[in-house]
Image: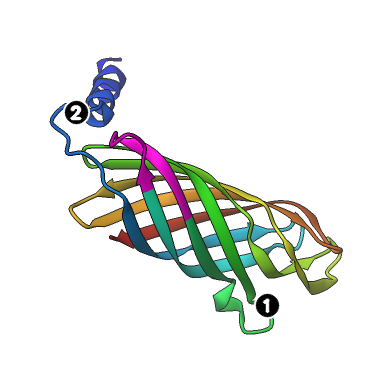
Amino acid sequence: MKRPAALLAWAALAVAPSSAAAEEKPTISTEARAGWTVLGGERVTGGFTVGAGARYLQPLDGGPWGLYGGLGVAAVGVSDGWYWMGLLASPEAGAWWASGAWHISTGLGLPAGQLPTCTDWGLCIRSWGLYPEVAARIAVRGESVRIGLEASGMLVRTLPWSGLGGQVRIVGAHR
């Protein structure tokens, strides 16, 4: 019983605001992303996903929090061959908080592009559309690099399948 309490106390100290922290400055960062996307019900599509992006991070009042805006591109299902690969481009915006080595953000995106989806009985097509997305990220940051894990949910409405798709990505950012 002592171990969970000790871990919780350590986590609280690790993310607690530090008065010695330097003032945050506006930053432009470039990102590389790699992960896994799952779309569909009985006949799942998606797969290994790679992408890149850029974000502008604007602190509020020089504090450890702020807003961001960015653009990203992704190739979904690159391991399944050219025909089943989806291509997305996305504006994104959200909020972030940083303390010490930790950087946490959450936001919304509106990916546009083409995704392959299938009906439960196997009819598969590539559909063009807008796919609203919500994402959360936790990262460890250094002087000019952030490495983290991001999870997102995407609303997919296509002719063969409609539902919630999911992505888990490893993200590396340089500023």
Depth check: give the residue in front, 94 or 100.
94
Q: Are the residues tagged 2 and 1 within 8 Å (C-beta)?
A: no
Identified by mark 2, the residue type is Ser
Identify the element where label 2 is drawn.
loop
Note whether 123 is above or below 108 in the view shown: below
Is residue 41 visible to us here? no
User: Callout 2: 10 Å neighbours few (<14), some, many (20+)?
Assistant: few
Task: Give the side of residue 2 with respect to residue 133, left or right.
Answer: left
Would residue 50 appear left or right of 104 to someone viewing this image?
right
Q: Amino acid at mark 1?
A: Trp
With 79 as the anchor, is 103 left or right in this view?
left
* Residue 2 in view, yes or no: yes
Is residue 21 positioned above or below 162 on the image? above
For the residue pair 71 and 141, the one nearer the viewer reads as 71
> Which image quarter is the N terminus in?
top left
Rendering quarter of residue 56: bottom left
Instruction: Return the residue at label 2.
Output: 18
In the rendered image, which residue does mark 1 sit on? 84
Residue at the spot x=34%, y=59% of the render? 28
Q: Quadrant of residue 13?
A: top left
- Identify the residue at image location x=44%, y=48%: 68
**15 and 69: which is toward the camera:** 69
Marks 2 and 1: which is nearer the front? 2
Q: Residues within 10 Å of mark 1 (few under 14, many from 20)?
A: many
Rendering coords of residue 144 (x, y %)? 21, 57
Percent position (x, y) of residue 41? 75, 55
Q: Quadrant of the C terminus?
A: bottom left
Stretch in magenta: 58-69
